[in-house]
Amino acid sequence: MADRKEIRLKSKSIVYWTSTIILSFALLSGGAAQLARQRQTVDGIVQLGYPVYFVTLLGFWKVLGAIAFLAPRFPRLKEWAYAGAFFDMTSAAFSFAATRSSAWHVAVTLLFAVLVIVSWATRPPGRVIGILFPAKASSEPA
């Protein structure tokens, strides 16, 4: 029985770190490209209908979000980073769909939104603020 629990915890840890590292790399590299105002990145934002200054704003928050995901402690900051990354990815997917961009743009950004959820859902206890759905106490009447 202890072996099953240990295997489950190790599997959860592997899923957490794999999803978090992929997500952090994507945010960090994308944010760095935006902060560097790479031509393709700027053109992509403008094609979606956003102003050029939006590139810098997104890049700044993406880099900080990636750092927050990887830094030890600060669970409340991580919660905000997860929310921001989820809003960023789902908004990007919506923007791509609204401007009739290629389907793979929508799919990739939705895949990253799923990675945000997977990373958030598999966090170790030290990276969690509290319990989202507390169990009922057994002493309460049904």
Image (cartoon, helix red, strand yellow):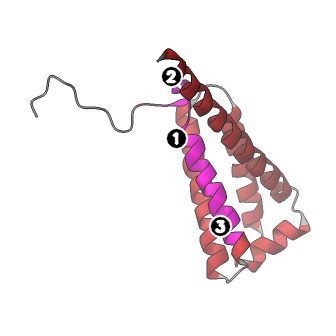
The residue that mark 3 highlights is 92
Mark 1–mark 2 Cα distance, whole angstroms, equals 17 Å
Which of the 4 image quarters holds residue 72? top right
Q: Nearer the viewer, mark 1 or mark 2?
A: 2
Return the x and y of residue 37 as percentages of the image width and height.
87, 62
Which residue: 69% across, 76% down? 103
Q: Is residue 93 left or right of residue 131?
A: right
Q: Amino acid at mark 1?
A: Ala
Q: Amino acid at mark 2?
A: Lys
Which residue: 60% across, 66% down? 91
Which residue: 76% across, 51% down? 26
Query: Tag 3, which secondary structure?
Result: helix
The residue that mark 1 highlights is 121
Q: Is residue 64 visible?
A: no
Return the x and y of residue 107 as percentages of the image width and height.
67, 67
Q: Nearer the viewer, mark 3 or mark 1?
A: 1
C-beta proximity under 8 Å, tags 3 and 2: no
- The outermost residue toward the top is 2
In this picture, is 94 found above or below 58?
below
The residue that mark 2 highlights is 5
Query: Tag 1, which secondary structure?
Result: helix
Q: Is residue 27 magenta?
A: no
Mark 3–mark 2 Cα distance, whole angstroms, equals 38 Å
Mark 3–mark 1 Cα distance, whole angstroms, equals 22 Å
Which residue: 65% across, 59% down? 111
Which of the 4 image quarters holds residue 11? top right
Magenta highlight range: 105-130
